[in-house]
Every structure is written in structure tokens, then in C-alpha cells.
Amino acid sequence: MKRKENFVLQNIGDEHILVPIGAEVVNLNGILVLNETAMYLWEQLSDEKSTEQLINAIMEKFDVDDITAANDVNNFIGDLKEKGMLIS
């Protein structure tokens, strides 16, 4: 999977927000506030990645166990799919 390119990351104060641009502006459900883990995953999705690759990247970057990493990845991917922000 890979992220769609018609969303930009905006930093507003201490928050990181994904904002739709272009045709996606019509879908305001696409706005998503990111924590540090989600921001890292979004960056990773600039290239095609599997769920397993994302889990491994989270485990390495944040020194968490595989269950925690899998939960974080699956929750974030679920949010992105729900908002139409991924190319599968």
C-alpha cells in the first residue's frame, strides 16, 4: 500500500494535521491529526510498503514489541482506508 499524494502534512502549533488538497477538499472527513507514530507511518507510506514492513519499521524506530507495533499500524491503516487516503 501507498499513501495518496493529494494530502499535505501541515504543522499547526504542536499538532501535525493531514489536510486534503485538490479534488479531495470536498471530502472533509480526510482531515487527520497525527501523533509521532502516525506521522512516521505516513512518511513511510511515501513508497509502497506492506503491513509487515510498517510493523518492522515501528518496532525499530520506537523500540516497541510486535503486538504494540501491529496494533498501531493496523489502527492507523484502518483510519487511512476509511478516509480514502491510501492506494492499495
Image (cartoon, rainbow, N blue to C red):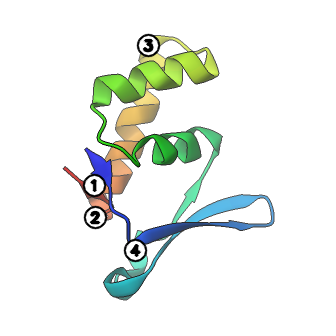
Q: Disc 3 versus disc 2: distance between alpha carbons? A: 26 Å
Q: Position of residue 21 (x, y in %)?
A: 44, 80
Residue at image location 47% in from the left, 48% down from the top: 42
Residue 37 is drawn in which quadrant?
Answer: top right
Disc 1 marks which residue? 81
Q: Earlier in the sequence, mark 3 or mark 2?
A: 3
Residue 24 is drawn in which quadrant?
Answer: bottom left
Q: Are marks 4 and 2 in contact (CB under 8 Å)?
A: no
Q: Earlier in the sequence, mark 1 or mark 4?
A: 4
Number of the label disc, if any, that sits on residue 66: 3
15 sits left or right of 9 in the view: right
Residue type at mark 1?
Answer: Lys
Disc 2 marks which residue? 84
Q: Residues within 10 Å of mark 3 (few under 14, many from 20)?
A: few
For numbered disc 2, what is the local secondary structure? Answer: loop
For numbered disc 4, what is the local secondary structure? Answer: helix
For numbered disc 1, what is the local secondary structure? Answer: helix
Residue type at mark 3?
Answer: Asp
**Count of numbered tags:** 4
Q: Residues within 10 Å of mark 1 (few under 14, many from 20)?
A: some
Q: Position of residue 85 (x, y in %)?
A: 33, 61
Residue at image location 52% in from the left, 68% down from the top: 8
Q: Disc 2 versus disc 1: distance between alpha carbons? A: 5 Å
Disc 4 marks which residue? 29
Residue at image location 37% in from the left, 53% down from the top: 79
Q: Position of residue 1 (x, y in %)?
A: 25, 44
Residue type at mark 4?
Answer: Asn
Q: Disc 1 versus disc 3: distance between alpha carbons? A: 22 Å
Q: Are marks 2 and 1 in contact (CB under 8 Å)?
A: yes
